[in-house]
Image: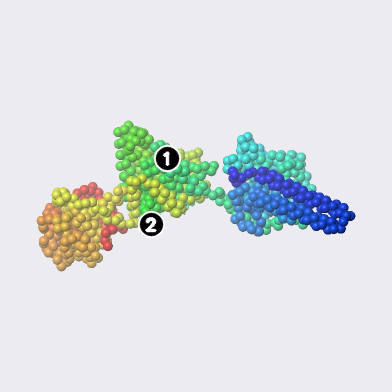
């Protein structure tokens, strides 16, 4: 039973009921006396009148009857009013399961919001019956006498009411039943696995009484500690009941004799127990005369008398069925075993939005500790970074949602920036960026990366970006003589220095291979982890298998920086080797440890459900509405979606164009800023492009993007555009380019030679060759010679070929076969072509490291690149 602060303690209710009952009895007696007196007076009068005149006699008979009726009616009215008031009071005093009829119960019947001060026993047997209640928890001990089996079923019913009327686990029952172990209260047995009931046989009384006396002493000394009169008052004042009620049910036969020691202990429990929440319910063992002992005497035919109802008799309720008892007890035990409901998600949110400063640290609660208080995660100078571990399904994403919600509601965008990357297949962070369904975004979020599982380069790009920011901050700090973020902010109050939190979920994917990406990522991580703390850049790395990340454990210096550890159930190696706490916690819990996982720093946290979409949507909408006027939506990188063709800047002035050459965009690089991959077509030799590989769609997208961007930079008629298409697969893309570029000419196998003979002109000339290798037979001999001349001489005369060859060997054949030189191909984009096939086109022996993957290409421009970079073709082809 939870004591709500508004609710009067049970003892107050008991006395209120006592008072009302006494008044009822007094009023009934007074009414009756008045009626009797009226009758007596009338009878006397009648007698004297009878002796006088007969006429007067008749009149007086009428008067007498009227007086009698009126007295009777007044008595009935007053009695009814009192009984109604008493009935209402009884209902209020025994709300929910404490007072409702067993026939209306279900297994789920549980405590209402009110505290049950009294328990219903039956009905008071009057003309207008009303509930007969007995006090128990925080109010009285019970002594029952009468036929054993009836007493036991009354005890069973009262226990069931008390158990169901209090919070699961708030009442623990010990049943001493030496005679018929189990007996009428055996139905409570399903409570045993949850520790809510224990049965004691012969020999069990002494230890029970001793234990209760000790319990009372402990409560008085340690819990009440002189500050509270009793547990009821403590519960009323603090809103929490720290200790369960203890109920000792003593079922002895009347012949039972207690030893003097037992008698002394029992007297002690009766005298001092109630203030410590300890109660005795006894049948067959006398309880000492005490005002706090409520006596129930059960007679024949289910009629009883109680101390509270006095001379009014009580008709006992029918007992609850054994099925009901079992079901209610089972459900209670299940609830106790499952534990209390977690703190709600809303409890993580502050009263006031965006009222915190991150100058010193970022503090945000994620759940409730074992003491019922919220547990905060802190990121700042110490601890600077967090490592989260837990197998798939253990609740990492939920934890991140809880943490992000608590952070995003406390720190405004000027105080906090979030970069969120998820390496698993899925879209858990997608909700923070605008979508077709929901235009809102989380204002603190600058970058969201989803479906990045095959794009480890994007993880690297994020680390490079953070590294640049770290340099910028370190530079500013050095200039201003600041050693940490709070000082930098003080020295530069007008500057924009939010704390940055980068969350990388399933970061083991980033470090999964032994390659250049992993080694650069580890070096960047090391630098960020070491120097980020003082510059307000915090890393939160989450993984389903921290233990399995080889690249991480080889660098103890790196792991050591991640002093905040959060282990979800069954997480391996997130905490210290000898710390097994994560093995022991149940679902929806985490071990939070801000001291690198040492056992003494463990805090077990129960996490709320933070993933509910409608709740998040409402919260995000609230934050979005409050966003600053200049808030930009986050950059969304979705590895599964081809990038959209970008908005192009205004064309450059003609003389600039003539001097520097136009720039073709080929696709988007895997980069935080979404930078395009460019090809500058100036007059340097080799300024041609070969797209290599058999994926027609990607090849066409690259050529069309290049064509559209080049056309945009030239005023109509100031450049020549030739579209050459030699394969049906490319026709629709080639035609779309043709129609998008005014004045472009169309060429196919029928007039390809004419184009190769007549490419030179007095303006820039861009030739887009779709599947050039398909023209091999037409070009054979002279045509190939013309092609080679155009590739070699064209760029100097501002003619550039951007051609697609379906294999590298076909390009080589077109350039002269074995031993052909590739000088004329200054830039290339490889699709489904392996790195080693590109060795002749690459400055490093053996070619670039490249394993083809869908919707990705490798771009190399020898004029600007030291190594090839991955690009994603734009979505341009209709
Ligand atoms: N504290 C919690 N309260 C209620 N439900 C939770 C809680 N934690 C997790 N869940 C639920 O458990 C399921 C798994 O959680 P979650 O997706 O966070 O796990 P995960 O470790 O990220 O798993 P995966 O790596 O497979 O995505 C989800 O349906 C989530 O809603």
Mark number displayed over residue 256: none
Q: Residues within 10 Å of mark 2 (few under 14, many from 20)?
A: few
Snapshot quadrant of residue 15: top right
Location of residue 152 in the rendering, given as x and y in whole percent from the top left corner: 72, 53
Give the residue displayed 77% in from the left and 53% down from the top: 71
Location of residue 287 in the rendering, given as x and y in whole percent from the top left corner: 75, 44
> Closer to the N terminus: mark 1 or mark 2?
1
Q: Give the quarter of the figure containing the C terminus.
A: bottom left
666 on left or right of 326:
left
Secondary structure beneath disc 1? loop
Location of residue 171 with respect to 107 vertically, above or below? above
Q: How is the image coloured?
A: rainbow
Location of residue 382 in the rendering, given as x and y in whole percent from the top left corner: 42, 37
- Of residues 265 and 653, the one nearer the viewer is 653
Give the residue displayed 72% in from the left and 48% down from the top: 21
CB under 8 Å between callouts 1 and 2? no
Give the residue displayed 13% in from the left and 62% down from the top: 755
**Residue projecting furthest to the top:** 481
- Of residues 372 and 117, the one nearer the viewer is 117
Q: Can the viewer see residue 696?
A: yes
Pointer 2 residue: 437
Ligand 1 is within 8 Å of the C-beta of the residue at disc 1 = no
Label 1 and label 2: CA atoms lie apart by 31 Å
Pointer 1 residue: 356
């Amino acid at each position: 039973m939870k004591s709500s602060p508004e609710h009067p303690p049970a003892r107050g209710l008991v006395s209120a009921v006592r008072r009302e009952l006494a008044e009822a009895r007094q009023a009934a007696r007074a009414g009756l006396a008045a009626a009797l007196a009226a009758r007596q007076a009338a009878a006397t009068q009648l007698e004297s009148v009878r002796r006088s005149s007969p006429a007067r006699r008749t009149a007086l008979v009428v008067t007498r009857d009227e007086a009698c009726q009126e007295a009777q009616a007044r008595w009935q009215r007053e009695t009814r009013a009192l009984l109604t008031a008493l009935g209402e009071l009884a209902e209020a005093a025994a709300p929910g399961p404490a007072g409702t009829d067993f026939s209306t119960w279900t297994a789920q019947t549980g405590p209402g919001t009110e505290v049950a001060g009294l328990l219903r026993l039956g009905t008071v047997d009057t003309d207008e019956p009303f509930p007969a209640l007995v006090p128990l928890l925080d109010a009285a001990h019970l002594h029952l006498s009468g036929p054993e089996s009836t007493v036991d079923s009354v005890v069973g019913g009262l226990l069931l009411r008390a158990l169901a009327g209090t919070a699961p686990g708030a009442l623990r029952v010990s049943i001493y039943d030496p005679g018929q172990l189990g007996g009428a209260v055996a139905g409570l047995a399903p409570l045993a696995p949850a520790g809510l009931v224990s049965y004691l046989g012969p020999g069990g009384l002494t230890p029970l009484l001793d234990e209760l006396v000790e319990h009372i002493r402990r409560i008085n000394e340690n819990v009440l500690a002189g500050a509270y009169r009793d547990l009821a008052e403590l519960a009323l004042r603090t809103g929490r009941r720290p200790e369960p009620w203890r109920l000792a049910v003593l079922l002895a036969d009347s012949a039972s004799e207690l030893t003097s020691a037992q008698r002394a202990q029992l007297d002690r429990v009766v005298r001092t127990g109630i203030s410590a929440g300890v109660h005795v319910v006894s049948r067959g063992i006398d309880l000492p005369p005490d005002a706090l002992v409520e006596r129930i005497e059960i007679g024949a035919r289910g009629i009883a008398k109680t101390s509270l109802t006095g001379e009014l008799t009580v008709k006992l309720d029918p007992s609850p069925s054994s099925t009901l008892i079992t079901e209610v007890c089972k459900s209670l035990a299940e609830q106790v075993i499952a534990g209390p409901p977690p703190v709600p998600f809303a409890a993580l949110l502050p009263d006031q939005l965006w009222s915190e400063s991150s100058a010193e640290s970022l503090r945000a609660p994620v759940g409730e500790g074992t003491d019922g208080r919220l547990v905060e995660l802190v990121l700042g100078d110490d601890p600077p970074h967090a490592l989260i571990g837990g197998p798939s399904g253990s609740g990492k994403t939920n934890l991140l949602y809880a943490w992000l919600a608590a952070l995003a509601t406390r720190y405004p965008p000027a105080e906090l920036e979030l970069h969120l990357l998820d390496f698993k297949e899925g879209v858990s962070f997608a909700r923070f960026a605008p979508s077709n369904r929901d235009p809102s975004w989380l204002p603190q979020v600058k970058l969201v990366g989803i479906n990045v599982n095959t794009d480890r380069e994007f993880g690297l790009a994020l680390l490079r970006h953070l590294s640049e920011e770290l340099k910028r901050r370190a530079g500013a700090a050095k200039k201003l003589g600041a050693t940490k973020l709070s000082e930098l902010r003080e020295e530069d109050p007008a500057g924009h220095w939010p704390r940055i939190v980068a969350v990388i979920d399933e970061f083991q994917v980033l470090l999964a291979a032994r390659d250049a990406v992993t080694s650069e990522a580890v070096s960047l991580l090391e630098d960020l982890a070491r120097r980020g703390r003082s510059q307000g850049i915090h890393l939160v790395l989450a993984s389903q298998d921290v233990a399995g990340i080889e690249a991480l454990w080889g660098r103890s210096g790196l792991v050591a920086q991640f002093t905040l550890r959060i282990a979800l159930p069954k997480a391996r190696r997130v905490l210290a080797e000898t710390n097994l706490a994560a093995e022991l916690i149940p679902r929806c819990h985490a071990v939070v440890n801000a001291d690198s996982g040492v056992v003494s720093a463990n805090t077990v946290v129960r996490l709320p459900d933070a993933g509910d979409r409608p709740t998040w949507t409402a919260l995000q909408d609230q934050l979005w509405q409050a966003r600053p006027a200049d808030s930009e939506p986050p950059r969304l990188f979705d590895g599964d979606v081809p990038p959209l063709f970008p908005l192009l800047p205004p064309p450059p002035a003609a003389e600039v164009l003539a001097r520097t050459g136009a720039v073709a965009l080929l696709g988007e690089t895997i980069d935080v800023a979404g930078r395009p991959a460019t090809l500058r077509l100036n007059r340097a030799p080799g300024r041609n492009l070969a797209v290599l590989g058999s994926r027609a769609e990607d090849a066409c997208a690259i050529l069309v993007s290049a064509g559209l961007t080049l056309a945009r930079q030239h005023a109509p008629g100031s450049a020549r555009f030739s579209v050459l298409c030699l394969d049906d697969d490319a026709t629709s893309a080639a035609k779309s380019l043709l129609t998008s570029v005014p004045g472009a000419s169309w060429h196919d196998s029928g007039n390809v030679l004419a184009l190769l003979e007549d490419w030179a002109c007095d303006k820039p000339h861009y030739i887009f060759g779709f599947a050039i290798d398909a023209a091999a037979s037409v070009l054979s001999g002279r045509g190939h010679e013309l092609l080679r001349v155009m590739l070699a001489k064209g760029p100097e005369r501002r003619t550039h070929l951007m051609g697609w060859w379906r294999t590298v060997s076909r390009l080589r054949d077109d350039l002269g076969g074995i031993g052909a030189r590739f000088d004329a191909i200054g830039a290339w984009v490889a699709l489904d072509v392996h790195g080693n096939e590109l060795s002749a086109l690459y400055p490093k022996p053996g070619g670039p490291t490249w394993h083809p993957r869908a919707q990705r290409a490798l771009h190399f421009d020898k004029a600007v690149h030291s190594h090839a970079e991955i690009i994603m073709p734009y979505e341009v082809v209709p």
